[in-house]
Image: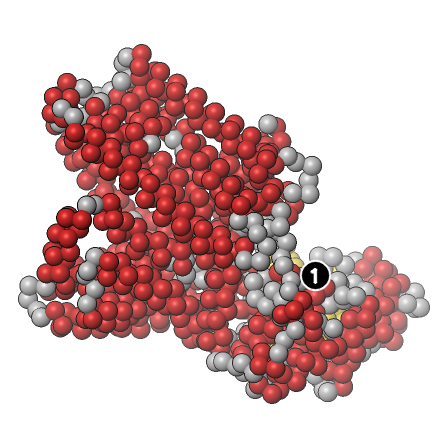
């Protein structure tokens, strides 16, 4: 289980409160969508979970492991896909994947099986021997996705994963997210694409100006809102009122 | 011209991160960082003071033979040569490898506008390198010769123009070099080898000119001229690089018309060179650049084979391999690290190539008799190369925007340290081999030397590498648009050089003191023990620094 307990983060001299006392729980087998307008605090929250930004206050636990107290143990269970797929330009795709597999200490046969599976799914097999510098944005995105799947993470955390993916890969990714969730893993992702969140997520949280303004299943969210038809309407109404 | 100025403004803001300085000064942690960096820089001062006071003595020597203009020539020539040689790498990465090119090239700008702007911001950077070298010469001469206000006015103008001509020359050389090495396929390899050859060739030409000039001086009625003409030496030896001579003579002939004319000549030629460089850039710049931005893909090799999956290694090896691949495949890194450890040992023995056979033979016999000293110097040299290669002192800075990968992966700090030190040792081994070659040429390589220099050299590279990593982990420079900035324009390299030199100097001094008392083998063992012990102590410090930085980075 992923637990965020009263986490806050301010930038500058406490002038900008990027995340303001957020608490969340995500259970195994759940796909959790994290929505919010630009600059609402989505990426900051995600960065605090994966170890890129230390919270000013509050605790984050994954399976009762404090992410910031025992980072190595926690990180070996987490895979992160950032919003911009920035990777080592001068490595070949396969070299990068092998590097990641070495760090997670994945045995040879398992790594081969997983890498081949996801290369097939994302149709990256023909380019995997090339230097990453030659990849398009979408290809890099796929590479980072594959690298995040190699260690079969307990918590799969993605920041705007659909941006830059072609429709087919986007579809495949959704399938994978569902599959991971069926295996009892946690999938946590942020997105702007409300349709995706609506169709895919078991639960959703909407964050605005650093605070969670609504959280729950689609049905629960509908009850918060007067406009009950689509997530888009709910989102617009809730974020406008803040 | 106004476009060039607009580009320069943006470039300078970007290069010196002016926009973030204000914020940094508000933040207490950043101020602590700045103070610590200042302290580290101040630790360089004793060495600097030592050098400057040495200069003062040199002035007295020139004064005594009535040739004090030679002193000015030495300073200006040194400054211009440094700009010329370092300029080649700076120009190459600034003009051809910086990421802003992806934005600039599609804009409706002429090549000369892009090059002009990049030239000007490089020039500003060069002043920062140049002033600590040039100012002592100008000031010592000024104070000791009791000059008037005109001297200070002239010297200000000269300082402003000193880097222009050499930087124009490096720009032109690099533009043509890139133009004719812009060949598909092995572009990076070709350019790296070309770079090493180019630097060695330039230094050879310089040395050759110098020895010709020196011989010309000796041939004539030397003493008579020396007494009658106070600028005799400067004019003879200045022929190596005439602009330096013009600048030196304008300052020494200050009171006469010829002083003014030399200044005028220096300034006009500098401006002229700038426009020639711009003119040429319009014709060759894009030809060397386009294609540089494209990355080739090879459909043939793209598919992976079974064995590509069958490679697994422990994390520290994986990390070391990643570091080495990045170093070797990024031209700027390759030229700085491996290029450095190849060039330095070769340049060191170049002067001996210039000498005639007789004096080289004499030197060989001297060297043969002092084998133990050679071994110790060899060890110090390799240890020092460990600082020069700057692999460790930029290891985190080089991660740049990819730092998130290192921070989100479950990598033990121990593996981070071992992996990164291994990458530096890989580079060091190349340096050691080149040094063996250089020593063999001088007939000073023995079996004992091979073992002692190899083993102690590698052992010594570990603590100096760790010092570099401590500096870089403490203040990694992660926001850069041009790989050169991570490697050479990185203050961490300089700080490491100061701290590392003190470390080597300390051990060197100890070894020197022990030479008379102890057997050389015991000294070797003592040095080895110091290296190992300090490695362990520094390892503990480094571990703490990395842990803290990896947590606190934002």
Q: Which residue is drawn at 51% across and 63% down?
A: B326
Image coords of residue B421 (percent x, y): 39, 69
Image vertical order of residue B82 relative to residue A188, above or below: above
Image coords of residue B37 (percent x, y): 38, 52
Image vertical order of residue B149 relative to residue A100, above or below: above
Q: In which chain is the residue bearing label 1?
A: A
Q: Nearer the viewer, residue A166 or B224?
A: B224
Q: In this view, does A209 lie to the left or right of B279?
A: right
Mark 1 falls on what kind of element? helix
Q: Residue at x 81, y 65 (%)?
A: A193
Q: Can residue B535 be seen in this view?
A: yes
Q: In which quarter of the image is residue B257?
A: top left
Q: Quadrant of the C terminus of chain A?
A: bottom right
Image coords of residue B215 (percent x, y): 20, 34
Q: Name the residue under label 1.
A: A137
Q: Residue at x 92, y 65 (%)?
A: A227
Image coords of residue A174 (percent x, y): 79, 75
Q: Which of A7 and B220 is in front in this view?
A: B220
């Amino acid at each position: 289980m992923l637990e965020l307990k009263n986490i806050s983060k301010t930038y500058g001299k406490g002038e900008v409160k990027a995340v303001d006392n957020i608490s969340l729980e995500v259970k195994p087998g759940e796909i959790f969508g994290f929505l919010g307008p630009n600059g609402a605090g989505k990426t900051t929250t995600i960065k605090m979970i994966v170890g890129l930004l230390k919270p000013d206050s509050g605790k984050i636990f994954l399976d009762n492991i404090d992410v910031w107290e025992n980072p190595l143990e926690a990180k070996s269970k987490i895979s992160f896909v950032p919003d911009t797929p920035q990777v080592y330009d001068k490595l070949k795709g396969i070299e990068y994947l092998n590097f990641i597999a070495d760090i997670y200490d994945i045995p040879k046969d398992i790594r081969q099986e997983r890498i081949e599976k996801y290369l097939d799914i994302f149709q990256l097999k023909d380019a995997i021997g090339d230097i990453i510098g030659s990849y398009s944005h979408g290809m890099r995105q796929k590479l980072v996705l594959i690298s995040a799947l190699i260690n079969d993470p307990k918590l799969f955390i993605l920041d705007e994963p659909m941006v830059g993916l072609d429709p087919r890969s986007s579809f495949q990714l959704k399938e994978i997210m569902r599959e991971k969730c069926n295996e009892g893993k946690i999938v946590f992702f942020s997105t702007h694409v409300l349709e995706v969140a609506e169709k895919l997520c078991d639960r959703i949280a909407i964050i605005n100006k650093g605070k969670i303004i609504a959280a729950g299943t689609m049905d629960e969210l509908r009850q918060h809102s007067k406009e009950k038809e689509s997530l888009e309407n709910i989102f617009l109404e809730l974020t406008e009122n803040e | 011209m106004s476009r060039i100025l607009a580009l320069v403004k943006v470039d300078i803001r970007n290069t010196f991160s002016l926009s973030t300085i204000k914020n940094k000064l508000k933040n207490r942690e950043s101020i602590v960082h700045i103070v610590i960096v200042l302290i580290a820089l101040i630790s360089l001062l004793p060495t600097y003071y030592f050098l400057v006071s040495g200069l003062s003595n040199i002035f007295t020597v020139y004064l005594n033979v009535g040739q004090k203009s030679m002193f000015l020539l030495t300073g200006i020539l040194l400054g211009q040569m440094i700009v010329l040689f370092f300029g080649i790498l700076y120009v190459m990465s600034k003009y051809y490898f910086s990421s802003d090119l992806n934005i600039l090239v599609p804009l409706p700008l002429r090549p000369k506008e892009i090059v002009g702007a990049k030239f000007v911001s490089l020039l500003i950077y060069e002043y920062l390198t140049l002033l600590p070298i040039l100012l002592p010469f100008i000031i010592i001469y000024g104070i000791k010769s009791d000059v008037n206000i005109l001297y200070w006015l002239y010297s200000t103008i000269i300082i402003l123009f000193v880097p222009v001509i050499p930087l124009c020359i490096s720009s032109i050389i690099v533009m043509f070099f890139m133009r004719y090495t812009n060949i598909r396929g092995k572009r990076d390899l070709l350019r790296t080898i070309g770079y090493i050859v180019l630097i060695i060739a330039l230094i050879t030409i310089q040395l050759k000119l110098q020895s010709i000039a020196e011989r010309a001086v000796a041939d004539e009625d030397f003493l008579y001229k020396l007494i009658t003409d106070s600028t005799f030496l400067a004019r003879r030896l200045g022929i190596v690089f005439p602009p330096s001579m013009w600048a030196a003579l304008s300052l020494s002939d200050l009171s006469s018309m010829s002083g003014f004319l030399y200044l005028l000549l220096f300034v006009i030629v500098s401006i002229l060179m700038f426009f020639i460089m711009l003119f040429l850039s319009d014709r060759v710049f894009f030809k060397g650049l386009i294609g540089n931005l494209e990355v080739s893909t090879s459909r043939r090799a793209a598919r992976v084979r079974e064995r590509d999956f069958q490679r697994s290694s422990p994390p520290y090896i994986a990390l070391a391999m990643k570091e080495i691949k990045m170093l070797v495949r990024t031209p700027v890194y390759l030229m700085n690290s491996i290029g450095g450890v190849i060039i330095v040992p070769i340049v060191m023995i170049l002067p001996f190539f210039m000498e005639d056979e007789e004096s080289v033979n004499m030197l060989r016999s001297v060297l043969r008799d002092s084998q133990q000293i050679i071994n110790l110097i060899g060890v110090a040299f390799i240890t020092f190369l460990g600082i020069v290669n700057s692999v460790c002192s930029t290891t985190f800075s080089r991660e740049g925007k990819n730092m998130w990968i290192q921070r989100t992966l479950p990598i033990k700090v121990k593996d981070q340290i071992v992996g990164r030190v291994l990458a530096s040792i890989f580079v060091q081994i190349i340096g050691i081999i080149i040094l063996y070659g250089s020593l063999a040429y001088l007939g000073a390589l023995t079996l004992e030397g091979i073992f002692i220099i190899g083993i102690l050299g590698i052992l010594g590279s570990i603590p100096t590498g760790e010092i570099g990593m401590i500096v870089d982990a403490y203040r990694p420079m992660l926001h850069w648009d041009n790989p050169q900035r991570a490697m050479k324009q990185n203050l961490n390299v300089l700080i490491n050089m100061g701290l590392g030199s003190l470390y080597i100097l300390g051990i060197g001094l100890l070894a020197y003191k022990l030479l008379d008392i102890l057997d050389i083998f015991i000294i070797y063992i003592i040095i080895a023990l110091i290296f190992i012990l300090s490695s362990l102590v520094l390892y503990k410090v480094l571990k703490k620094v990395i842990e803290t930085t990896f947590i606190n980075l934002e």
